[in-house]
Image: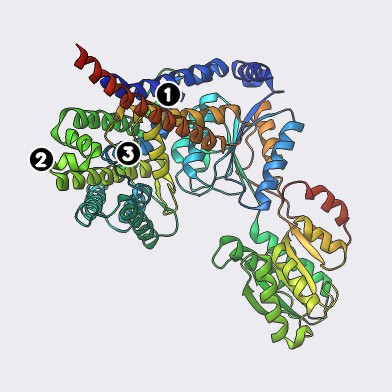
Amino acid sequence: MKLMKTLLVSAAIAMPAAAFAENETVGFSQIGSESGWRAAETSVTKADAKERGITLKFADAQQKQENQIKALRGFIAQGVDAILLAPVVATGWDEVLGEAKDADIPVVLLDRKVDASDDLYLTAVTSDTVHEGTVAGDWLKDAVGDAQCNVVELQGTTGASVTIDRKKGFADAIASADNITIVRSQTGDFTRAQGKIVMESFIKAEGGGSDICALYAHNDDMALGAIQAIKEAGLKPGEDIKIVSIDSVPDMHLAISKGEANATVELTPDMAGPAFDALEAYWADGTQPEKWIQTDSTLFTQDDDNEAAYENKKALGY
Amino acid sequence: MKHSMKLPLYITVATFVLAYAACVAQYPNMLSSRVIANLLTDNAFLGITAVGMTFVILSGGIDLSVGSVIAFTGVFLAVVLRDTSLHPLSAFALALLIATVFGAAMGATIHYLEMPPFIVTLAGMFLMRGLAYVLSTESVPIDHAFYGWLQSLYWQAPGGGRFRITGLLLLVTFGVAMVVLHRTRLGRNVYALGGSAQTAQLMGVPCARTTIAIYAISGGLAGLAGIVFSLYTSAGYSLATVGTELDAIAAVVIGGTLLSGGSGFVAGTFFGIMIMGLIQTYIVFDGSLSSWWTKIVIGGLLFTFIMLQKGLAWLTTARIPRANGSTARS
């Protein structure tokens, strides 16, 4: 088995890249496994590579940039055909990306961008976090029509760029609708427990919840906590209070399928799919992709098959 | 006696050579100038830190503050270069001065207040990490022409390996440390202090001066490692190099230095660093092993080397009476 692997790897290195498009080797430097989403991203990437017949070399950086730089240098020394990098911080990549460029190894950034000149990498595959908020806001506009609607908002961690972006996107979307107003907005720190506590105080402050028409949470975990709080207040989540949030974790699909929530915007863990597409085109005839590939922010509502989505996602490590 | 002192060093070197050979047998690409250059560049900051740690451990102490000193130096440089018009070289001198004085202060506390080094340097670790946070909680990029120039100084070996100035600095640091430890009075005093502080004092070793010098060296080298690290990442980040002190201690012990002090070689530390770098490189080349195996293998190696030291110590103490006996008989 080991010998087999050795042979395959040395074969892949010995062959010129273009003549051997079938079995490419790609190095993937992942930040770590600090959140469920990231674990899902890792397992999706591994599965995707396997499906395409790409040999994936995986290196977990345990949240340390020095480990990521070491891994990248190791990949370059090994002569891989491409590198996927999910950078832990934005700074300090120029030198090692320059080495990859000199070795003619394309680098694709996943999920986050870096502060480096954009000719040092092939492309970046990330989600547009402002757009995610806009999708959620647009859904709410459609859902309420002309009726008056007071919205409460559960924000993510204060000051985080995701929080700022998701708040802005939602606010932009509902700016044109005079009937929708955000009456309360507080941080729930992206956690289930905090989401529940803050929602309880919202309900108390807004006439036992009767004045609240909808909840917008910056992530699913806070929304799931809030559902609990709404139930405990004797209201029906999803009917008395509409719920829309972002991420599409498996438990949220379950909640939507039970009618306890209304919609979620997916932050896809499949960043590697578009990355591999771009790389395959690049290997085939040197096609240069756009410098930024934006992943789809798909909206899941009660009309979608959420049970199937739950089944698909529950094994990904969320 | 002399022979058995060098035995751990030989074992470390042999371990490295055998491990490298085994890696090359599986991945022929590991015998490239790139991998060798990477081993030097990627481990430069850790290696320089470990040289200071070798001084400290040889003297029977420990320095837990070095990881924080590296992070502090990095953030300090980044903030100074961002907010002032100071030239990087002046900033380097300032950073080295702060780190050295900080180390000397810890050494003085350890000696004059007779405090255990573990506690004093633990306090130093929190202090420096805290100061780094005060300067900036975010990663501060360093964008200075001088940095770009330093980073562009490398020798491209056949095969694409880039031998950078930081790798050279690592080798020079080890060379200087070897001369200081084996050819100067300070070096002899370090060994004497680690052998037994009381005996050293009776022999007239200036304990106060030596202890302060040892921790000043460790602090100063951690500062130098901080400069190397800031060149490595072109940024200062207060969360960087958490736990580096433990990696440095591990490298020193794998290098054959006795944790109780008095015996060991700085050359061993070099191979300790290289073994740790090799494990990481192998894991990246394999690509399917969890990177936590680095820690597991280093843990296993540490345990093996500690057992080895214990065994050697037992052998040498057991042999001495026998040697005495034979002289008496003849």
Identify the chain of the residue marked 3, using the numbered disc in the image. B
The chain under label 1 reads B
Q: How is the image coloured?
A: rainbow
Q: Which mark is residue B36?
A: 1
Which amino acid does the dot numbered 1 rest on? Ile
Of residues A200 and A181, which is closer to you in this image? A200
Left or right side of A181 for B106: left
**Residues at discs 3 and 2 both on one chain:** yes
Query: In terms of sequence position, does the residue under pointer 1 or pointer 3 come before the other?
Result: 1
Q: Which corner quadrant of the image does residue B327 belong to?
A: top left
Q: Which residue is mark 3?
A: B260
- In three-dimensional space, the C-alpha distance between marks 3 and 2, rounded to whole angstroms, equals 21 Å
Residue B142 visible at all: yes
Residue at position x 10%, y 40% in the image: B204
* Mark 3: secondary structure: loop
Marks 1/3: CA–CA distance: 32 Å
Q: Is residue A194 left or right of residue B112?
A: right
Tell me if mark 2 has few (under 14), some (14-19) or many (20+) residues whose alpha carbon lies within 10 angstroms of its own: few
Q: Position of residue A103 (x, y in %)?
A: 51, 26
Disc 3 marks which amino acid? Answer: Ser
Residue shown at 15% from the left, 46% from the top:
B209
Residue beneath disc 2: B204
Q: Is residue A182 visible?
A: no
Q: Nearer the viewer, mark 1 or mark 3?
A: 3
* Label 2: element kind: loop
